Image (cartoon, grey):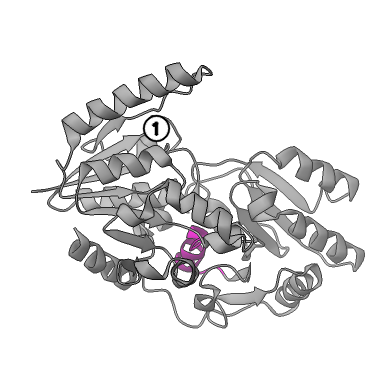
Amino acid sequence: MKKLLFSAYSLDIGGIEKALVTLLNELQKKEYKITLILEKKEGIFLQELNPKIQIITYTPNDDKNIIKRKIINCIQRIKFILKYRNKFDFAASFATYSNSSSFVSRTASKNSCLWVHSDYSTIYKDNIKEMIKFFKEKKYNKFKHLIFVSKKAEQSFVSVFPKVKGKTIVCNNLVDSKKIEKLSNEPIETQKENITTFLNVGRHDEKEKRLSRIIEVAKKLKENNYQFRILFVGDGKNTEEYKNMVKEYKLEEQIIFVGKKQNPYPYFKISDCVILTSDYEGYPVVFLESMILNKPIITTQVSDYEDIEGKFGYITTKDIDDIYNKVKLFIENGFEIKEKFDAEQYNSDIMEKLEKIF
């Protein structure tokens, strides 16, 4: 039985965490012994993880005394090395941003992998020096493989680090379509209404998600007498800012803040279209969720948006007027999805890639 290790920060709500839990639960069905190492054993998805998966914590000390912190962390690293060096057939740092996750996975197996969930040249706004510094801290060149969840993320990475070509693999996130379909039927208080309803699901982080664009579009729609409503499922550091914006524009009847939900899928059921206005994404989990639930998507040009264009919805630039025009087009004409997404084949292709790596 092959022993696999995955390391991450926590299992709090988020696309990366949801993708990790889906992957681990699917792998647990096969002949693998799985260990998960977390910096913090917390988060809404902990209860969804298969109980057979062993969880270990590896939490770097953050004492304000630099000397004390360095000594404690050095001792902790030595203990981990002595206990776990090359004890696994495969190890992955699933949280790209975590230095300790990188250390853990590289130590635990010679067959190590760094998972890259976003296009980092976009995150760093083409500040290549900062991007290089970020990945050097993760010791990217020490990994046997680098897995990217989108073609665009791989291409931009290789353009900055050409020597890694041959070590990179594009592998989208697995998706549990049966679970999503089942959960979408759970009852909720918010009801379906005879009005075009848009849905945004995700973290309220203006730097990345740019939900202010949706609010600005809603303002223009109201000014032009369109009938609609928008559901925001999620929360984050900018939630209050968004609520104040909605109040200022008098959009309380058009934009509804539902809050953070462990099960967002019933809200897909009562919506007509999913809207995404991010500046950057990896491969958005919400793309897959929308396709499974047969909901059209309006999205900015984030990673691999070509998978959506013309087949599952409308693509926009990051310009408010362009987003407005696509939303208006949907209200007036809708969008017909002609070919249903084949989740079974999609997952099969991903598992084939992963099993080769393991």
Question: x and y percent of residue 53 in the render?
Answer: 23, 38
Question: Residue visible at 64% across and 40% down?
Answer: 236
Q: Residue at x 23, y 25 (%)?
A: 79
What crowding class fits label 1: few (fewer than 14 Cα within 10 Å), some (14-19), or many (20 or more)? Answer: some
Q: Is residue 183 among what the camera can see?
A: no
Against 297, residue 145 (above or below) is: above
Give the left or right position of residue 60, taking residue 210 as reference: left
- Name the spot of residue 334 as percent of width and height, x first: 67, 77
Residue 117, image x and y in percent?
Answer: 45, 57
The residue lying at 86 percent from left, 59 percent from top is 219
The image quadrant that residue 228 belongs to is bottom right
In-image side of 200 versus 339 (left or right): right
> How many badges with numbers are in the image?
1
Q: Residue furthest front?
A: 67
Q: Nearer the viewer, residue 56 or 266?
A: 56
Asked which quadrant contains residue 313, the reply is: bottom right
**Residue at the spot 24% in from the left edge and 62% down from the top edge:** 354
From the viewer's side, name the closer residue of 41 and 163: 163
Of residue 308 and residue 335, the one placed in the foreground of this image is: 308
Residue 258: in magenta span: no
The span picked out in magenta is: 281-295
Q: Is residue 288 part of the magenta span, yes or no?
A: yes
Query: Quick one: quadrant of the C terminus?
Result: bottom left
Judging by the rendered image, the residue that carries numbered circle 1 is: 39
Please state which of residues 30 and 152 is positioned toward the viewer in this rendering. Answer: 152
Q: Quadrant of residue 224?
A: bottom right
